[in-house]
């Protein structure tokens, strides 16, 4: 059974500082996705990582994937209040029936 | 472009009442469809997924059921709601085998409160 772990589950960030959050998974996979959820809202796709060493950047967020370590990192540069949200990673098992296994999410709160 | 709709957006139902939530996808054919539930402050729990109009799989045994009356329509139902059914219900789709992509796209969700 595929397990996806995110840590920490909650992170209080100071504006302007850099942070990294992590997503570990238990089974070989080369498909990892990051989603963002604002309070009371649905999930919005952030990044799609489909190979070892993949790196994607959007604004102050940069995601990377190390399939050998079964680890993805989401790096936040100079945190701003707008980044306050819950971030989920999801790992996909390749095959005919595409299902994603989600982590429990990391709630980020940016304080002045 | 593809869009996904869910309704109703919010629902308050008494314990023991029936439930029907609807999800429709536009702009794509033969999508894989998913129902998730998110309890307050928690992660996503996959409830059902469907890779075809006659193929629905249940992930968690419970008092909920799902149906797919049309290719792009996915229904979540219950005959008798429990308090524990309260939560945020999300429908999602992906292109599955046809496009070889597994990224899922989520609908706006239905917030269900069982009283």
Image: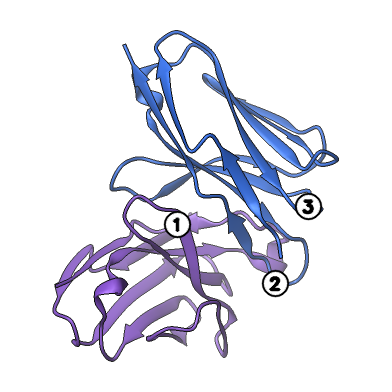
Chain colours: A blue, B purple
Q: Residue at x 73, y 38 (%)?
A: A71
State the CA–CA distance, disc 3 to disc 2.
14 Å
For numbered disc 1, what is the local secondary structure? strand
Task: Determine whether, in the image, residue A70 is placed left or right of residue B91.
Answer: right
Q: Are the residues flagged by discs 3 and 2 in contact, CB closer than 8 Å?
A: no
- Image x and y of residue B10, in percent: 20, 63
Residue topped by disc 3: A29
State the residue in front, B68 or A92.
A92
Whether residue B56 is visible, yes or no, is: yes
Q: Alpha-carbon neighbours of circle 1 within 10 Å: few (<14), some, or many (≥20)?
A: many
For numbered disc 2, what is the local secondary structure? loop
If you read the primary sequence from the N terminus, does the residue marked by circle 3 or circle 2 appear first? 3
Work out which quarter of the rendered image holds the C terminus of chain B and state it. Answer: bottom left
Q: Residue at x 58, y 75 (%)?
A: B30
Q: Are the residues flagged by discs 1 and 2 in contact, CB closer than 8 Å?
A: no
Residue B94 figure quarter: bottom right
Q: Is residue A102 above or below residue A97?
A: above
Whether residue A76 is visible, yes or no, is: no
Q: Which mark is residue A5?
A: none
For numbered disc 3, what is the local secondary structure? loop
State the residue in front, B96 or A63.
A63
Residue topped by disc 2: A97
Task: Determine whether, in the image, residue B38 is placed left or right of residue B14.
Answer: right
Q: Are marks 3 and 2 on the same chain?
A: yes
Q: Is residue B95 above or below residue A31?
A: below
Q: Alpha-carbon neighbours of circle 3 within 10 Å: few (<14), some, or many (≥20)?
A: some
The chain letter under disc 1 is: B
Q: Which mark is residue B106?
A: 1
- Image x and y of residue B24, in percent: 39, 71
């Amino acid at each position: 059974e595929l397990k996806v772990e995110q840590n920490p589950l909650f992170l209080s960030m100071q504006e302007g500082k850099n942070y990294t959050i992590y997503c570990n998974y238990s089974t070989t996979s080369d498909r990892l996705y990051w989603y963002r959820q604002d309070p009371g809202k649905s999930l919005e796709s952030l990044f799609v990582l489909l190979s070892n060493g993949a790196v994607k950047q959007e604004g102050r967020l940069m995601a990377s994937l190390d399939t050998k370590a079964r680890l993805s990192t989401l790096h936040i540069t100079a945190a701003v209040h707008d980044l306050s949200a819950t971030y989920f990673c999801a790992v996909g098992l390749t095959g005919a029936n595409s299902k994603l296994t989600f982590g429990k999410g990391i709630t980020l709160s940016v304080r002045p | 472009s593809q869009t996904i709709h869910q309704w109703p957006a919010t629902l308050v139902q008494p314990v023991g009442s029936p439930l029907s939530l609807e999800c429709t996808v536009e702009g794509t054919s033969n999508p894989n469809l998913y129902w998730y539930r998110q309890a307050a402050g928690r992660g996503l729990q996959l409830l059902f997924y469907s890779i075809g109009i006659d193929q629905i799989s249940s992930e968690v045994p419970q008092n909920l059921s799902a149906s797919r009356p049309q290719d792009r329509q996915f229904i979540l139902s219950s005959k008798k709601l429990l308090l524990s059914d309260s939560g945020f219900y999300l429908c999602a789709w992906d292109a599955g085998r046809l496009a070889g992509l597994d990224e899922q796209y989520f609908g706006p969700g239905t917030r269900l409160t069982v009283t």
